[in-house]
Image (cartoon, grey):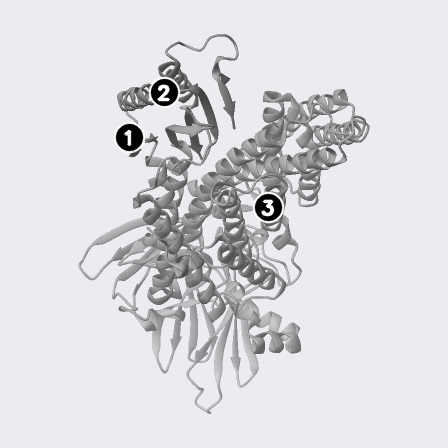
Amino acid sequence: MSSIEAIFFWLSIGFYVAATVAIFAGTIWRREQWVRNSLILSAAGLVAQAGSIAVRWYEAGHFPYIKAYENVLVGAFVMVAAYVAIAYWRKSLAFIGVLVLPVVLLTLGYGYTQAEAAGPVTPPYQSFWLVVHVTFAWITYAAYSVVAGLAVALLMRQRAERKGTEKTGVPSWVPPSDQIDELSLKLVAFGFLNNAVMIASGAIWAYRLWGSYWSWDPVETWSLLTWLAYGFYLHARLTLGWKGARLAWVALFALFGVLMTFWGVQLAPTSYHLFRDLGNGMIGASRPM
Amino acid sequence: MRDSVWLRRLASAKLALWLIGALIVMNLLSVLVPQRIVLGPNFESFVSDYPMLAGLTEFVGLSTVFTGWPIVVVAVLLAVNVTACTLLRILRRRGVVPVPRAVRADRVVTLGGVGPKAGAAFLDGARTLLQSRRWQIVSEAPNGIVARAGRIGFWGSMLLHASLLVLIVGGALTAITAFKGEMAITDGESVVDAREAYINVVDMPRIGPAFTGARISLDATEVKYEQEQVVSAVARMRGVDATGRIVNKNVRVNHPLDVAGKSYLLLNSGYAIAITVDTSATGAAPRVVRLSEETPYGWRDSFPLPPTTDGRQAELRFLATPVALEEGQPMPVEKFALTDPHLRAKLVVGGEEVWEGRLKPGETQQLGPGIALGFDGMRLWDRFLVRSEPARWISYVGFWMAVIGAAVRFAFPERRFAVVVGVVDGHEVADVIYRVRPWSGFEARADKELERSLLQLATGSAPSGPDAESSPSETE
């Protein structure tokens, strides 16, 4: 990471930390303005992060989409962009940053530990299908993390509703449960569709790179499970008619699959082969026979 | 139509939940316990590092989570669950559903009292209005009608569910038709796709021939570097299948050579040396030797020679480097750029080193009485993963069916209007019931307008004012 890139990177982290503090403080002390301010801080962080992506792009000579750090850098950007866009569209939903912002900070923190100097695109990454795969992964996980944020908002709203009194009751800016439910459904459907494209393009890339479209690799199987979990969410909502807290818990549970795909299996101590090794070695197809 | 109890049980969401739960458990196990299918030969490192643990996991079968019977059972049950669910939906759809049960309401607009005569006229008018807007009347009774639009969304859902079955079939066929092996080809060499051309064969198809007889040629391999990293590795290849069809391709990682149903994927490279060994027993014999072992100081291998006249074993030992290096000096990072190749050779007779020297391309050295070594040049050899998964196309179709099905399902929401005349407290009352699934799509505004037209039809006047949309009374 160059010094200019690092300045933008840490600037964005600073804004996101400030936004997280503001949103938690606003939620705890019921100050709507603080929650709105957190949205402004997030937008500022987004601009700074765009700067770090631009610098990285310039230095590497290609759009940053390879290896863990670049993936995380752009992935977190898309996540915050989705959050800011939705919260800007409906101001009352700025509240979902309660989950989205900590997840973004964790993601960027993980990415920082994996940071490498910008370099050329090595042969394993020179694939159209990889670009499709990664792009749709960013969009998918951004949608899913916003859904999880909405689930937290819904659970907090219902908890507040149960308390019931005027003073400790529901903050006026938190949207009604059915609105959150409706938006969550749309985002899950959007994420589910993108997830399908991500898996399909990933399978085609895998065949061109490793000679097998499906190898039961931990990353593959967790991404399939995540897709099935969100498929269950859609069935629970549309076929079984689940709503409210029950569905919110399904969304949070399904996010566990996303986290496992992205981090969990990468950190597993007993896995000898993982995508993190991709590109090492001579010409660099890492999957063993 | 009454659904069979078994069909309902097999189609249940509970079963789906249990199956997804079982998959999660399998996945957790596969992350925690090293898997043979994922690690391949590297699994042996795990066995040697942790022999007791490895033995235990192998004994219990946890090291092959995705190739054992549990995954087959879960996959089959999932296929049955999806099939039953899909069948049930189609069967229910074909059945006659009475009005107004055909519509589970998202929004109910209750009109005021409607007399029997006015009610019948209202239903006639509503039918005409709906049909003029291209709504399909799906259910009709003396007390009401049900109309539907956006039916294509339902078929999107069917396509999405059918895709899972196609994927499972594709996966099963792949398991019995796949071929997997490894092959090494040197620049300038041709091989025929037969068992003896392979270094190893891991998977043999249970159906169909394993070897194609295609001739595969490698003309040259070119590797380029930037910032001490490989940015391009191209193997210029040619394949000729049994019918004589010729395929020329610049093969790269991610861009395999596809000939006779097999894909030749470039994995990595090594050094090969062209030498001429001239002994009194064999005469001058040019040959190409693939050096099999990479070390930090170069690629090395040994080459057996005929025994000496006094019966002692003799061999040549080689260490090749891409540039001139002093002994003990490590290889450059750009190791496949053969800019100034050198060959260090040793003649060992009966375990005793009798000659050592360094050769440049074109040089010949006399190693001893009756033996000479000529170094003709150095080139690369490539290791290829050879795969054949003929059923992958079925799975690809399944993947894109899922994508298209999901897109259609969510792009075309299915909407229903039910117009019902019922009796409440002895008075005839008309309801307009509206439902949209999975959500109010792009047509929501048009549907609202249609709803207002239906209300206008019932009351004989257009609702007015800011609350017009919710008058006379609306529930959701």
- The residue mark sitting in front, 2 or 3, is 2
- The residue mark sitting in front, 3 or 1, is 1
Q: Residue at x 56, y 70 (%)?
A: B63
Q: Secondary structure at mark 2?
A: loop
Instruction: Please tell me how crowded label 2 is: few (under 14), some (14-19), or many (20+) other residues with Cα within 10 Å.
Output: some
Q: Residue furthest left?
A: B243
Instruction: Please tell me how crowded label 3 is: few (under 14), some (14-19), or many (20+) other residues with Cα within 10 Å.
Output: some
Residue A63 in the image: x percent, y percent? 53, 33
* Residue at the spot of label 1: B136
- Mark 3–mark 1 Cα distance, whole angstroms, equals 36 Å
* Relative to B29, B248 lies left or right: left
* Relative to A249, B401 lies left or right: left
Write down the quadrant of residue A28 in the picture: top right
Q: Amino acid at mark 2?
A: Gly
* Residue at the spot of label 2: B115
* Relative to B160, B334 lies left or right: right
Instruction: Please tell me how crowded label 1 is: few (under 14), some (14-19), or many (20+) other residues with Cα within 10 Å.
Output: some
- The residue mark sitting in front, 1 or 2, is 2
Residue A116 in the image: x percent, y percent? 65, 43
* Residue at the spot of label 3: A250
Q: Chain of mark 3?
A: A
Residue B473 in the image: x percent, y percent? 50, 20
- Mark 2–mark 3 Cα distance, whole angstroms, equals 48 Å
* Residue B283, numbered label: none
Q: Is residue B68 above or below residue B128?
A: below
Q: Earlier in the sequence, mark 1 or mark 2?
A: 2
Q: Amino acid at mark 3?
A: Val
The residue closer to the viewer here, A30 or A14, is A30
Residue B15 in the image: x percent, y percent? 49, 58
Q: Residue at x 59, y 37 (%)?
A: A147
Q: Residue at x 27, y 68 (%)?
A: B208
Q: Chain of mark 1?
A: B
